[in-house]
Image: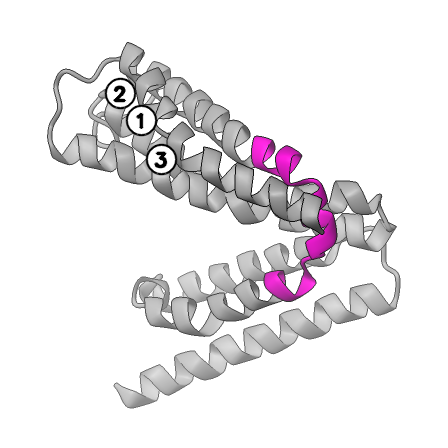
């Protein structure tokens, strides 16, 4: 058992080293036909397919989530904090919050109703969704927050407008929080098995964000004006 764990650890370390060296070579050699993020995705697909062929997916099924939460996620979070331009962030906070708050809600609703429509018409198997609006809203809130890693990498390489870069970067930081709150609201309604929940109840749920967002917006605006 220990040898299997050690072998998996060595394999993932090799994947990380190869990916790091590959993306570094792309940046140094100014290879513009493939962005570093795209190269990482391709390498991930290749190594994932290799694992599937060798071990039948068992290595992927037994992947310890602690490795992700305590090993991979903290560097990503800290890198985002260190790379944040605080002045540009607060100067454009109103626009960033609009994109993060309103944009994420719109995205969640679009995904939810599209999924509900496809499930209703039988395009999605009943084994996946029960054709209930609440389950579709849960799914929509889960995938509504998108991290534009590749877009930010392209912006950095091309030297895009700093305001545009920081607005997109700031939106990527805040949209996760909006998605989490949305998911928890719909999850609570789903666990209570609220049969009275209908489509016209959604605006009431969305309006519940206003009391929470208003103090945040006011405080951030004062901070930016003071700065």
Per the image, the residue denoted by label 2 is 133
In the rendered structure, the answer to whether residue 184 lies left or right of residue 207 reads left
Residue 148, placed above or below residue 18: above
Q: Mark 2 near mark 3, Cβ–Cβ under 8 Å?
A: no
* Residue 190 appears in view: yes
Image point (41%, 79%), residue name: 8
Per the image, the residue denoted by label 1 is 136
Q: Is residue 81 magenta?
A: yes
Whole-number angstrom distance, CA of label 2 to CA of label 3: 14 Å
Residue 27: percent from left, percent from top: 81, 64
Image point (54%, 29%), residue name: 103
Q: Residues within 10 Å of mark 3 (few under 14, many from 20)?
A: many
Whole-number angstrom distance, CA of label 2 to CA of label 1: 5 Å
Residue 18, picture quadrant: bottom right
Image point (63%, 51%), residue name: 149
Reading the chain from its start, which is encountered first: label 3 or label 1?
Answer: 1
- The colour scheme of the drawn protein is one colour
Task: Give the residues drawn in magenta, as a range.
Answer: 80-99
Reading the chain from its start, which is encountered first: label 2 or label 3?
Answer: 2
Q: Is residue 85 magenta?
A: yes
Q: Nearer the viewer, residue 123 or 209?
A: 209
In the rendered structure, the answer to whether residue 125 lies left or right of residue 155 reads left
Element under label 3? helix
Per the image, the residue denoted by label 3 is 182
């Amino acid at each position: 058992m220990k040898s299997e764990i050690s072998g998996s650890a060595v394999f993932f370390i090799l994947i990380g080293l190869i990916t790091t060296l590959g993306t570094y070579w792309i940046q140094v050699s100014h290879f513009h036909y493939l962005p570093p993020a795209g190269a990482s995705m391709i390498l991930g697909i290749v190594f994932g397919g290799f694992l599937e062929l060798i071990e039948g997916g068992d290595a992927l099924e037994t992947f310890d989530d602690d490795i992700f939460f305590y090993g991979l996620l903290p560097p990503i979070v800290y890198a985002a904090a260190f790379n944040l331009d605080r002045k540009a962030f607060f100067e454009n906070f109103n626009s960033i919050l609009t994109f993060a708050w309103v944009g994420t809600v719109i995205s969640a609703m679009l995904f939810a109703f599209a999924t509900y429509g496809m499930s209703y018409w039988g395009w999605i198997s009943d084994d996946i969704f029960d054709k209930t609006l609440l389950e579709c809203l849960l799914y929509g809130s889960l995938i509504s927050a998108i991290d534009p890693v590749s877009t930010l990498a392209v912006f950095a390489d091309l030297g895009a407008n700093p305001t545009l870069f920081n607005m997109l970067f700031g939106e990527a930081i805040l949209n996760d929080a909006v998605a989490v709150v949305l998911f928890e609201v719909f999850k609570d309604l789903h666990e209570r098995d609220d049969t009275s929940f209908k489509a016209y109840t959604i605006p009431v749920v969305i309006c519940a964000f206003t009391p929470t967002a208003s103090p945040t917006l006011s405080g951030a605006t004062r901070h930016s004006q003071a700065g």
